[in-house]
């Protein structure tokens, strides 16, 4: 058996090595091939996970390291797909290049499905057993798109890090995979080893030792992914500096997000000095968890970064979340994968939730995000929403979404509109039936083009219906 393990971030690499060390990925005799994809917008300018400081010791746990970007060059990992005709050819090529016998069974362990590059690897290795390794808070919610039949038929296991003790991730739960949990302490041990490896880098940045009376502010890149404007993001980070002052601490350690613009640094430095706070810039190509492990801040502040969860779970550090209420308002569409991390962080910091009570809320939001794949959660969602209507928990839901799914808390339809809505639904149904009938005779017409024709046959009935209703 050969294990092909695909990652795209150093944090994922740390999680995988923690699983290996804990014996959760099988026996040491397993041959392990690590496939590293650099999914950044400009991979030529951004170091891949194996090139980042702190990775050298982790790479010793693998028999072969593959640069996926080089393998598929000049394609980008996010854009590279493969047809059914080419897949067998590429499998044979990769087996040959990676020294895997044609009859050797493969255990494929990939990041989030069905996106690329994970998805394309499942298409290439068509007989491999599939497992998913999950890191961060997104694993506690649903995936964006349903798996294909060949994928979920081969899905075996979900590996996840226990960032929320007592809460089981909902990712791919509709397929009932086995779940293997990695205790946070095992990941902490790997992070500490990485910190020891990069001690010179930390020392050069004055980050090698605990910084007393400090708070770490973790920058996010919300403007870069068009969730808010650059001005709103700067204001959000300034509020984080204000929070440090309000907590009575004396030093700010600012760790920018690796992919964010650096234009916020000077305004944050200035705000810190205005408030009488020391400002330490941790602009290093290191995981935030490594810097937390060495500087030992008393508080970690961000919006809804997974770093808040890892700080709590790995180091027991106090955390504060800023701007989550605003983000709950503006995050769109409702199915956005950031919704579950945002919901969890807001609930724990401003929603009055204890960790053990998060399950019903996560179930309800998960169902509203992906009602088809998470249909098994409908009763849970109804039960939660029946008790939530009229209360603070309704901030986690959109009334239009509840209306679409016919759930408690939905918008009330005015009585004079109900007949019109049902008539419109009948109109669409008639058009689709007519389209299907014409198709059987080899005539193809889009349903929207049929609506006027169908409408003419229903117009008199519809008009009579509307005239008979009271004007409200």
Image: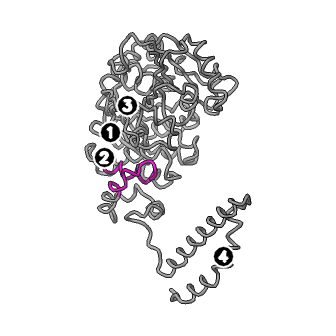
Which residue has dot 1 on it? 168
The secondary structure type at the circle numbered 1 is loop
For label 2, the crowd category at 10 Å Cα-Cα, with few meaning under 14, some 14 to 19 and many 20 or more, is some
Spatial CA distance of label 1 from label 4 is 50 Å
Indicate left or right for 343 with 316 as reference: right
Q: Residue at x 46, y 40 (%)?
A: 274
Picture mark count = 4
**Residue beneath label 3, please?**
160
Q: Which residue is mark 2?
A: 359
Do the residues bearing badges 1 and 2 touch, measured as CB atoms within 8 Å? yes
Looking at the picture, how far across and down is residue 176, in whole percent?
Answer: 37, 39
Which of disc 2 and disc 1 is earlier in sequence?
Answer: 1
Check residue 455 in the rendering and tell me which mark sits there, or answer none: 4
Q: CA distance from mark 3 to mark 1?
A: 9 Å
Please indicate, yes or no, whether residue 240 appears anywhere in the rendered image: no
The span from disc 1 to disc 2 (Cα, nearest Å) is: 8 Å
Circle 4 or circle 2, nearest the eye: 4
User: Which residue is the extreme one toward the right?
Assistant: 443
Mark sitting earlier along the chain (1/4): 1
Is residue 323 shown left or right of residue 248?
right
């Amino acid at each position: 058996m050969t294990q092909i393990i695909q990652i795209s971030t150093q944090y994922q690499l740390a999680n995988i090595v923690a699983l290996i060390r804990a014996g959760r990925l099988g026996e040491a005799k397993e041959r392990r091939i690590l496939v590293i994809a650099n999914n950044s917008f400009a991979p030529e300018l951004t170091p891949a996970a194996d090139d980042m400081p702190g990775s050298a010791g982790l790479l010793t746990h693998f028999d072969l390291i593959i640069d996926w970007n080089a393998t598929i060059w000049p394609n980008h990992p996010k854009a590279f797909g493969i047809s059914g005709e080419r897949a067998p050819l590429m499998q044979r090529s990769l087996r040959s290049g990676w020294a895997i016998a044609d009859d050797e069974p493969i255990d494929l362990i990939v990041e989030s499905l069905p996106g690329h590059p994970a998805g394309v690897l499942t298409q290439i290795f068509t007989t491999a057993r599939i497992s998913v390794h999950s890191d961060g808070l997104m694993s506690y919610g649903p995936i964006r798109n349903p798996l294909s039949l060949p994928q979920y038929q081969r899905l075996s296991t979900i590996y996840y890090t226990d960032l929320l003790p007592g809460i089981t991730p909902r990712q791919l739960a509709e397929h009932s995979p086995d779940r293997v949990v990695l205790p946070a302490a095992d990941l902490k041990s790997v992070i500490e080893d990485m910190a020891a490896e990069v001690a010179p880098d930390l020392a050069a940045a004055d980050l090698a030792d605990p910084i007393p009376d400090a708070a770490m502010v973790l920058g996010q890149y919300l403007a870069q992914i068009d969730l808010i404007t650059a001005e709103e993001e700067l204001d959000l980070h300034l509020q984080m500096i204000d929070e440090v002052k309000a907590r009575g601490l004396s030093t700010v350690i600012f760790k920018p997000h690796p992919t964010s613009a650096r234009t916020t640094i000077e305004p944050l430095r200035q705000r810190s000095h205005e408030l009488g706070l020391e400002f330490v810039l941790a602009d290093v190509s290191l995981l935030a968890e490594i810097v937390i492990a060495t500087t030992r801040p008393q508080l970690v502040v961000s919006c809804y970064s997974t770093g808040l969860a890892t700080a709590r779970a790995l180091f027991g550090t106090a955390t504060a979340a800023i701007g989550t209420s605003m983000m709950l308002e503006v995050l769109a569409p409702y199915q956005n994968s950031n919704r579950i991390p945002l919901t969890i962080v807001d609930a724990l910091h401003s929603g009055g939730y204890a960790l053990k009570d998060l399950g019903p809320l996560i179930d309800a939001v998960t169902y509203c995000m992906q009602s088809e794949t998470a249909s098994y959660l409908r009763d849970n969602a109804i039960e939660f929403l029946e008790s939530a209507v009229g209360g603070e928990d309704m901030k986690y839901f959109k009334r239009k979404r509840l209306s679409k799914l016919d759930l408690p808390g939905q918008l009330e339809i005015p009585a004079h509109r109900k007949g019109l809505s049902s008539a419109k639904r009948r109109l669409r149904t008639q058009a689709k039936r007519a389209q299907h009938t014409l198709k059987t005779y080899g005539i193809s017409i889009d349903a929207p083009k049929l609506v006027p024709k169908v409408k003419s046959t229903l117009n008199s009935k519809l008009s009579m219906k509307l005239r008979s209703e009271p004007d409200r």
